[in-house]
Amino acid sequence: MAEITARIKWIEGMQMLGESGSGHTLVMDAAPSVGGRDMGVRPMELFLLGLGGCASIDVLTILRKGRHTVSDCVATLRGIRAETDPKVFLEIYMHFVVTGKGLPAHAVERAIRLSEETYCSASAMLGKTAKIQSTYEIMED
């Protein structure tokens, strides 16, 4: 089994410093309505960022292995959470804008499908509570 570690250190108020096992850090904070100062990313936003990053890496890797030329990939995510605790994600919408030369739609569709169904660990976990829907558009270089 692979192990991933993280360390969270309280700074002040509701502000936390997160440090990944690979040594990278980020600041998290809560909304002012719950005692935060809005000085960092919300922890639940990190789930969406993680999903978007995981899926984007998969899409790029799959397209490049297919020898497609990709010059840009942007994923925009929107999550709908439950109204009561625990406020899990119920729906997540991911929209990819993939830019390249002569990218065939079937290749982009396949890359997104493979990410969702086979490769993306974040999608597999979040998909246990949320319906994840993906759309895409292709931009020509």
Image (cartoon, grey):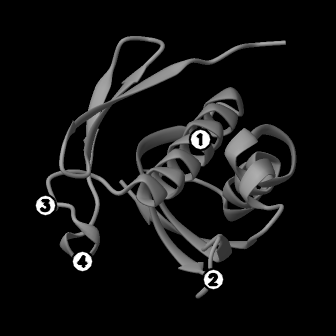
Circle 1 is placed at which residue position? 54
Which residue is at 76% across, 13% downward?
A: 2
User: Is disc 1 surrounded by few (<14), some (14 to 19) or many (20+) residues within 10 Å?
Assistant: some
Amino acid under disc 2: Ala
Q: CA distance from mark 2 to mark 1?
A: 23 Å
Q: Secondary structure at mark 2?
A: loop
Labels 1 and 3: the sequence-earlier one: 3
The disc label shown at residue 82, or none: 2
Labels 2 and 1: the sequence-earlier one: 1
Q: Nearer the viewer, mark 2 or mark 1?
A: 2
Q: Nearer the viewer, mark 1 or mark 3?
A: 3
Q: Is residue 89 visible?
A: yes
Q: Secondary structure at mark 4?
A: helix
Which residue is at 79% across, 61% downward?
A: 127
Labels 1 and 4: the sequence-earlier one: 4
Amino acid under disc 1: Cys
| Camera-nearest residue between 11 and 129 | 11
Circle 4 is placed at which residue position? 33
| Camera-nearest residue between 96 and 108 | 96
- Number of marks present in the image shown: 4
Q: Is residue 22 above or below residue 46?
A: above
- Residue 26, percent from left and from top: 28, 34
Q: Is residue 88 above or below residue 121?
A: below
CB of mark 1 within 8 Å of CB of mark 3? no
- Residue 99, percent from left and from top: 43, 54
The disc label shown at residue 37, or none: 3
Q: CA distance from mark 4 to mark 3?
A: 9 Å
- Residue 69, percent from left and from top: 51, 38
